[in-house]
Image (cartoon, rainbow, N blue to C red):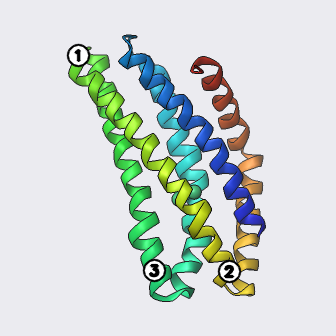
């Protein structure tokens, strides 16, 4: 299923980015001052690429068909599982932003804890979330969705992807991934 192949590929990009988020947290724990500009770039990556671009496709296309077509199991898996985790991720990002604002206003150990706890908490949540989608949710969808639904999800996803490419979204965030990988490798 082409749209799922794209989602799995995006998971690899997101996992690579989460590695840089973790590394940035490790540097703070080891005594470096947090670079709040870089952490804000990470929030931008998460909000625009991981959430807007990637979760956008999951929620609007694939998950929408799963909720409508796959009965109680589909509904529970998506509505009470995957969507709740997407929301929890958004909460981590808004709490990370608050901690960064607080640190920029007045650097404190408390604000530093907020930065590390929310950035690393997000990374850990998303890693587990991606593992569940790759090994369970996407396989279940491909096995059980109707042929018509699979075609529709692929078509909608293609259109979405073309627009994102034309708008430069993918290029911009792949460049940011490269920048953070260079800066926060260990
Ligand atoms: Fe997801
Ligand atoms: Fe995903």
Q: Quadrant of residue 62?
A: bottom right
Residue 75's disc number: 3
| Residue 85 drawn at (x, y percent) | 41, 58
Q: Nearer the viewer, mark 2 or mark 3?
A: 2
Q: What distance separates the C-alpha of mark 2 from that of mark 1?
A: 51 Å
Q: What distance separates the C-alpha of mark 3 from that of mark 1?
A: 44 Å
Q: Which residue is mark 2?
A: 143
83, 162: nearer the viewer: 83
Q: In the rendered image of this protein, does residue 12 appear above or below residue 158?
A: above
Q: Nearer the viewer, mark 2 or mark 1?
A: 2
Q: Do tag 2 and tag 1 residues touch (Cβ < 8 Å)?
A: no
Query: Residue at coordinates 42% horizontally, 25% vertically from top-left?
Result: 25
| Residue 155 drawn at (x, y percent) | 76, 71
| Residue 30 drawn at (x, y percent) | 39, 14
93, 144: nearer the viewer: 144
Of pointers 2 and 1, the one earlier in the residue sequence? 1
Q: Quadrant of residue 170?
A: top right
Quarter holding the C terminus is: top right
134, 150: nearer the viewer: 134
Q: Which residue is mark 1?
A: 108
Query: Residue at coordinates 72% horizontally, 45% vertically from top-left?
Result: 167
Q: What distance separates the C-alpha of mark 2 from that of mark 3?
A: 16 Å
Q: Is residue 123 shown left or right of residue 31? A: right
């Amino acid at each position: 299923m082409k749209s799922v192949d794209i989602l799995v590929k995006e998971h690899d990009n997101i996992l690579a980015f989460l590695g840089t988020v973790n590394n940035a947290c490790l540097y703070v724990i080891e005594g470096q001052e947090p670079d709040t500009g870089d952490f804000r770039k990470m929030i931008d990556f998460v909000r625009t690429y991981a959430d807007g671009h990637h979760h956008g496709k999951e929620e609007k296309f694939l998950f929408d068909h799963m909720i409508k077509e796959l009965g109680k199991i589909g509904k529970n898996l998506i509505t009470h599982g995957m969507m709740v985790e997407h929301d929890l991720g958004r909460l981590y990002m808004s709490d990370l932003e608050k901690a960064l604002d607080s640190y920029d206003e007045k650097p404190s150990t408390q604000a530093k804890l907020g930065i590390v706890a929310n950035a690393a908490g997000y990374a850990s949540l998303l890693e587990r979330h991606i593992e569940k989608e790759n090994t369970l949710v996407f396989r279940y969808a491909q096995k059980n969705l109707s042929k018509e639904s699979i075609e529709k999800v692929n078509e909608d996803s293609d259109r979405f992807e073309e627009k994102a490419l034309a708008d430069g979204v993918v290029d911009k965030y792949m460049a940011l991934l490269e920048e953070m990988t260079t800066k926060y490798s260990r």
